Image: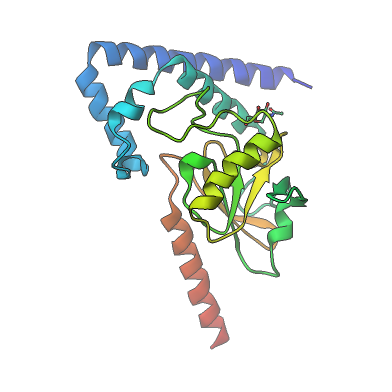
Amino acid sequence: MLSIRVFLQKLLILLHVTLCVIVGKTLMVLFPNAMKRYILKLGAKSRMNENPKFSYENWGPTFFSFKYLLFVLKVKWKRLEDEAYEGHPAPNTPVVTLNGEVRHLLDFMQDNRPLILNFGSYFSSTADFLIIYIEEAHAIDGWAFKNNVIIKNHRSLEDRKMAAQFLQKNNPLCPVVLDTMENLSSAKYAALPERLYLLQGGKVVYKGGAGPWNYHPQEIRAILEKMKSEMEGTSE
Ligand SMILES: *[C@@H]1O[C@H](CO)[C@@H](O)[C@H](O)[C@H]1NC(C)=O
């Protein structure tokens, strides 16, 4: 049920995002060079600039478009469903293996070993411990970038599985599972468009920032290194 409070929150977000897009678009028309420098600076914070095939012309001009507005709106609205907080129990949402079996996130946890969740879609294919393939950030029928892999928004689990198989072909050193079509894992972990978590003992130990600008695998590494040195400290 949509409560008045959620309705008002969504309305405020809608106004805010629309205003930002209008201002951004206007600035892009009036000061194209300054805006390009600004967007490139944002890009430098993600791994966007590291791909030589992926020039500014492929993604920069898509900013502040209507599809961009719809996507940002979806991301911000979805964040209202966030239920993952550091120090609190980790949401045990359903996921689907590439064989079609339904499992739950905490099934992938072994004893007290930390479990890293890497939420993303094709666009964010850095592999870690359990990859949860969620909806596409840059679907060809959504906020599309040029020269990117052609994947449509998933209309069925089968579509999502096909997209995840692209990823599966490329690299991962860990299992890949799919979010269900209710997108519960994505919603309860506020994972769109990409996000990292570290769970341990059924709890959220670390919640990374939202990607692409605040997605920092090195933070997970630092935590794991700290855990390791603490363990070595106690075993002495
Ligand atoms: C989940 O995401 C897909 C896009 O990948 C979308 O088609 C579908 O409608 C979403 N499901 C819900 C319940 O919002």
Look at 70% across and 32% down and name the residue there.
Answer: 156
Q: Nearer the viewer, residue 52 or 111?
A: 52
On the image, the x and y values in percent for residue 161 come to: 64, 42
On the image, the x and y values in percent for residue 115 come to: 61, 61
Q: Which of 228 and 165 is in front in this view?
A: 165
Look at 23% across and 29% down and name the residue there.
Answer: 37
Q: In this rendering, is residue 102 above or below 225?
A: above
17 sits left or right of 34 in the view? right
52 sits left or right of 148 in the view? left
**Rendered image coloring scheme:** rainbow
Q: Nearer the viewer, residue 13 or 35?
A: 35
The N terminus - image quarter:
top right
On the image, the x and y values in percent for residue 105 come to: 70, 53
Look at 59% across and 28% down and name the residue there.
Answer: 153
Q: In this rendering, is residue 169 above or below 201?
A: above
On the image, the x and y values in percent for residue 36 come to: 25, 25
User: For ligand 1, which image quadrant applies?
Assistant: top right
Look at 69% across and 51% down and name the residue there.
Answer: 90
